[in-house]
Image (cartoon, rainbow, N blue to C red):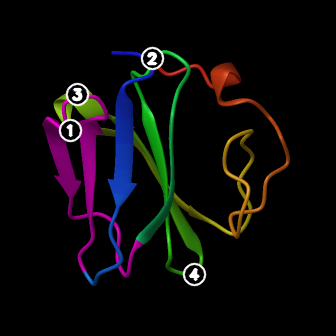
């Protein structure tokens, strides 16, 4: 599956996140209910096991999902986050996601 996954977020009051296959357009899962206003930044971990999302609220909600089971592992609202793959209004400081040990 690595390399074939796409995650897209909506701009809406109750936005959904769709995770789908880029080759055959199969929709694997729809995540919903946590973000408000919209989801503008999404990134998979190196092994595609986790998905990190950043919402449009202020402060920015950042959620880490174990997306295959629709499980929220971390949900925080922050003014600055530290990540190598989110580089927009969430303000990157370039600490790789791979260093985050999820148990």
* Residue that lies at the very extreme toward the front in this rendered image: 23
Q: Secondary structure at mark 1?
A: loop
Q: CA distance from mark 2 to mark 1?
A: 16 Å
In the rendered view, tell whether residue 35 sits above or below residue 64.
below
- For the residues bearing labels 3 and 2, Cβ distance under 8 angstroms: no
- For the residues bearing labels 3 and 1, Cβ distance under 8 angstroms: yes
> Nearer the N terminus, badge 4 or badge 2?
4
* Residue that lies at the very extreme toward the right in this rendered image: 93
Rendered location of residue 23, percent (x, y): 28, 28
Q: CA distance from mark 4 to mark 3?
A: 28 Å
Q: CA distance from mark 4 to mark 2?
A: 28 Å
- For the residues bearing labels 1 and 4, Cβ distance under 8 angstroms: no
Mark 3 crowdedness (10 Å alpha carbons): few <14, some 14-19, many ≥20: some
Which residue lies under the disc numbered 4? Answer: 58
In front of the other: label 3 or label 2?
Answer: 3
> Nearer the N terminus, badge 3 or badge 2?
3
Q: Quadrant of residue 27?
A: top left
Residue positioned 58% across, 19% down in the render: 101
In front of the other: label 4 or label 3?
Answer: 3
Q: Is residue 10 left or right of 91 when viewed as pictured?
A: left
Q: Considering the image in quadrants, where does the N terminus appear? A: top left
Q: Is residue 48 left or right of 71 when viewed as pictured?
A: right
Rendered location of residue 68, percent (x, y): 22, 28
> Nearer the N terminus, badge 1 or badge 4?
4
Magenta region: 14-38
The one of 30 and 35 positioned closer to us in this rendering: 30
Q: Is residue 70 magenta?
A: no
């Amino acid at each position: 599956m690595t390399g074939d996954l796409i995650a897209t977020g909506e701009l809406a009051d109750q936005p959904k996140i769709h995770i789908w296959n880029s080759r055959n357009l199969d929709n694997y899962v729809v995540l919903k209910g946590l973000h408000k206003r919209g989801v503008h930044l999404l990134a998979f971990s190196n092994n595609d096991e986790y998905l990190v999302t950043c919402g449009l609220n202020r402060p920015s909600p950042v959620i880490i999902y174990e997306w295959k089971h629709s499980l929220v592992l971390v949900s925080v609202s922050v003014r600055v986050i530290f990540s190598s793959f989110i580089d927009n209004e969430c303000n990157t400081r370039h600490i790789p996601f791979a260093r985050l040990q999820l148990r």
